[in-house]
Amino acid sequence: MSATVALNTGSTRRNVLSRIRSLPLFQQHAICITAVAVVALGCFPAEGLIGYRVTALVLLMAVSILAMLFRIGPVMVAAALSALAWNFFFIPPTFTFHIGSTEDLLLFLMYFVVASVNAVLSLKIRQVERKARDKEQKERTIELYNTLLNSLSHELRTPISTIVGAVDALQDRETRLTGEQRTDLLSAIDEAGMRLDRQVGNLLNMGRLESGMLEPKADWCDIHELIGGVVSKLGSVSDHAIILKADPSLPLFKLDGGLLEQVVHNMVHNAVQYTPAGSEVVIGASHADGSCVITIADNGPGFPEEERVRAFNKFHRLPNTRSGGTGLGLSIVKGFVGAQGGSVELGANQPHGALFTVRIPAETSFLSNLKHE
């Protein structure tokens, strides 16, 4: 958990710094000049207590902070301006650019050199960090690419092989098939086609999330009807007991019904796929704190506590689980819920099993109210 928080914090910090450095140059110059002026004015009343040498350290620290935030040009301007401000306001004789002693002249020159080198070194450090991040990102991308290929080599090949084999058997005129055998082959084709469609759909959905082009379209949605459609679709091809326990007085919710339907479908399918035959999957729906709340609970083996944080990662699957799936279903759930400003949590069902809780903020209205609008 702490590692995830650290990664999120680091990502947030990099995003903030990236936005600062992408500001127009004139804004960066204005901010740097203003910062130096504020620090100099702040030190001026206390110059009699801290001395002009300590003031140089304060100004140098300000330039160092600016060097971590802004591009090299504005920082060099800030370094030069801080040196001139230190000379004019603080080095005796004050309010003149004349420097009275050789020692102070050397201090002034050293100050300007240190401030300039500091700005250049900060730029070099940022460049090294950026190269390291790019290399790490490239390695992560290659790893995910290899994982995807390894997964798809089985997940796509298996249903395709099933379809091709069944079609060949049906087309073979020399093989006399009974009606039951033909029905079994057609059922195998149908099941393989659905599996293939699901995997391709997951890849397309993940592509939408990765590209940042996913834009939810909110409209009034009947949760009973939405979940009922998912139950009807999965219940007909599953040997699990899928039970809907929704509040009968639920209002209509204004959200993206298509995305939410995919969320419920992925979570229920995940529960069906990784729990023993005959297990119960209970779907709940309620309205709480201005949000649509949907729960998916099963009585299977559940998730070990240390695996719950990683459950929504791309391509992640529990160790020692049966084959099937690319590990994208729950990642898509998190992405689709997050796109609507919601959250999804994974906990433990009692006495055993997994419990998913989805909360999506949404406007509400009852059907009678909509009829009068």
Image: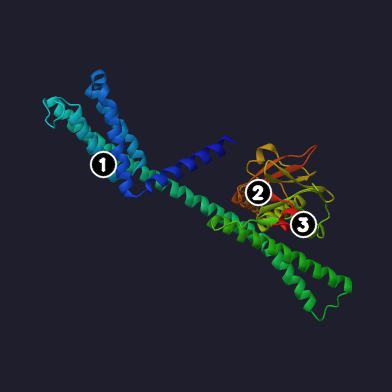
User: What amino acid is at disc 2?
Assistant: Ala
Sequence-wise, the earlier of marks 3 and 2 is 3
Q: Determine whether label 2 and label 1 are within 8 Å by CB.
A: no
Q: Which residue is mark 1?
A: 76
How many numbered callouts?
Answer: 3
Q: Closer to the camera, 324 or 194?
A: 194
Q: Which residue is mark 3?
A: 225
Sequence-wise, the earlier of marks 2 and 1 is 1
- For the residues labelled 1 and 3, the Cα–Cα distance comes to 63 Å
Q: Residue furthest top?
A: 49
Sequence-wise, the earlier of marks 1 and 3 is 1
Residue in the picture at 34% in, 43% down: 70
User: What amino acid is at disc 1?
Assistant: Met
- For the residues labelled 2 and 1, the Cα–Cα distance comes to 50 Å
Q: Nearer the viewer, mark 2 or mark 1?
A: 2
Position above or below: 198 against 358: below
User: What amino acid is at disc 3?
Assistant: Glu
Q: Determine whether label 3 and label 2 are within 8 Å by CB.
A: no
* Crowd rating for badge 2 (residues with CA inside 10 Å; few <14, some 14–19, many 20+): many
Task: In the rendered structure, find residue 362 and report the number of the disc placed on it.
Answer: 2
- Element under label 2? loop
* Crowd rating for badge 1 (residues with CA inside 10 Å; few <14, some 14–19, many 20+): many
Q: Is residue 292 left or right of residue 107?
A: right
- For the residues labelled 3 and 2, the Cα–Cα distance comes to 17 Å
